[in-house]
């Protein structure tokens, strides 16, 4: 199977401030390639699995927590594989991330777009384009959130399907996002001191420069907490969850705090988080300009077929979020599958031996992609 090193790095946009944003692309295996059209006149176009990385929307890049199992299955099934960066909170907001996703789709839609892979002496050079009508969007954790945003906001071409790997953002109207926490809530890890993160708290964030690449970094084993994140951005989403203010940073509504407004409704009406109708009092408080950032408010019969993979013991993104989205999509009459991994935590597919333990489920995810792109696995 193709390795992670065999790829191109492409700048798909620059922000008004001059920030370049990149994606990495791997070609499909030539003997398995599915050419659904022609790019640039003579170059075959490939279907695409477009992946967004995790990191709580606050950290990481296109090479963070890379799902090698998914990349290998995608290219071996004849699809190009793309792993893309996007702007990070803060100072970006969800609206900026939506803009990046839309710009990425617009970039891929260019009929003149093509890629040429460098070749070794004696090897045939690989040239290919992409078929923008044959894109499946995937993502892990916050990347699953981005996949939902693509389904909501990328009207044409709309993704053919979604593969959500313990995706965040399936229900933003719960205590996970809105309630302050005094006791450990994520893998039993320590409560953070906000004083250590002042530059990432409003209003100090107004001085931050936009970024789309925040690499993972860890302290050495000699640190008082061996292996503890050395990049403070890796802890930001946990801090925002701890303070119950994530939605302020996600929407950009700090003053007044949108989180505080929604929290009052959550506490006063004791809404049932498992049903959207009972959340009407909360929904009414969400400004119209932000509703396209809430996946649970945007599921219709035009939502792409969606497959969810999620651990039942996930303390970072409770499986409730995937269950709710699965239910809403099913009620809308759209094909959907939910594969629950009993007793497993967040990022279970990166654990040692995951390929041996979950190979059958990983193959099922590959089959789901092939089916909705229009190719059945061999």
Image: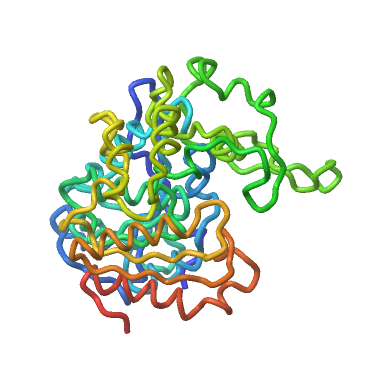
Rendered image quadrant of residue 255? top left
Q: Is residue 186 above or below residue 182?
A: below
Residue that appears at 55% across and 51% down: 316
Side of 37 where 285 appears, left or right = right
Quadrant of the rendered image containing residue 96: top left
Q: Of 29 and 300, which appears nearest the observer?
A: 300
* Vertical position of residue 338 compared to residue 325: above or below: below
Looking at the image, residue 325 sits to the left or right of residue 358; the answer is left
Closer to the camera in the image, 56 or 31: 56
Q: Is residue 221 left or right of residue 207?
A: right
Q: Residue at x 23, y 52 (%)?
A: 299
The number of numbered discs placed on residues in the rendered structure image is 0
Q: Position of residue 143 (x, y in %)?
A: 43, 50
- Residue depicted at 26% across the width and 49% down the height: 277
**Which residue is at the far bottom?**
378
Model colouring: rainbow
Task: Mark yes or no: residue 317 visible.
Answer: yes
Whether residue 46 appears in this view of the structure is: no
Q: Position of residue 311 (x, y in %)?
A: 52, 65
Q: Is residue 208 left or right of residue 181?
A: left
Tell me which residue sits at (47%, 64%) in the image: 310
- Residue 39 on image: x %, y %: 18, 56
- Pick whichever, 152 or 221, lies toward us: 152
Residue 135 on image: x %, y %? 26, 58
Quarter of the image where the C terminus is located: bottom left
Q: In this orientation, which residue lies closer to the viewer: 15 or 179?
A: 179
Query: Does 160 appear above or below 213?
Result: below
């Amino acid at each position: 199977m193709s390795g992670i090193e065999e790829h191109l790095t492409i700048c798909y946009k620059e922000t008004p401030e001059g920030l370049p944003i990149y994606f990495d692309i791997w070609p499909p295996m030539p003997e398995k390639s599915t050419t659904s059209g022609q790019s640039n006149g003579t170059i075959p176009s490939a279907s695409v699995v477009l992946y967004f990385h995790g990191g709580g929307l606050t950290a990481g890049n296109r090479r963070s927590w890379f799902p090698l199992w998914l990349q290998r299955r995608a290219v071996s099934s004849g699809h190009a594989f793309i792993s893309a960066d996007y702007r990070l909170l803060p100072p970006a907001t969800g609206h900026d991330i939506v803009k990046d996703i839309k710009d990425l789709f617009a970039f891929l839609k260019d009929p003149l777009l093509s890629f040429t892979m460098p070749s070794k002496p004696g090897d045939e050079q690989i040239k290919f384009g992409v078929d923008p009508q044959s894109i499946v969007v995937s993502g892990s954790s916050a990347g699953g959130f981005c996949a939902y945003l693509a389904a909501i906001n990328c009207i044409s071409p709309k993704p053919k399907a979604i593969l959500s790997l313990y995706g965040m953002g399936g229900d933003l109207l719960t205590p996970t996002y809105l309630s302050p926490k005094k006791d450990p809530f994520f893998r039993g890890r320590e409560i953070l001191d906000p004083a250590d993160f002042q530059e990432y708290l409003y209003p100090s964030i107004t001085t931050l420069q936009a970024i789309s690449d925040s690499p993972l970094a860890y302290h050495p084993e000699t640190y008082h907490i061996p292996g503890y994140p050395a990049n403070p951005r890796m802890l930001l989403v946990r801090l925002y969850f701890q303070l119950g203010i994530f939605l302020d940073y996600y929407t950009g509504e700090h003053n007044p705090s949108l989180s505080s407004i929604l929290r009052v409704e959550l506490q006063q009406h004791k809404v049932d988080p498992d049903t959207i109708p009972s959340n009407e009092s909360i929904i009414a408080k969400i400004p119209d300009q932000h509703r396209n950032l809430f996946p649970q408010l945007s599921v219709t019969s035009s939502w792409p077929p969606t497959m969810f993979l999620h651990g039942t013991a996930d303390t970072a993104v409770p499986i409730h979020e995937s269950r709710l989205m699965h239910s809403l999509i099913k009620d809308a009459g759209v094909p959907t599958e939910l594969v629950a991994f009993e007793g497993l935590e967040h990022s279970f597919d990166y654990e040692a031996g995951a390929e041996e333990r979950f190979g059958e489920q990983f193959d099922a995810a590959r089959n789901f992609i092939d089916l909705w792109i229009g190719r059945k696995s061999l």
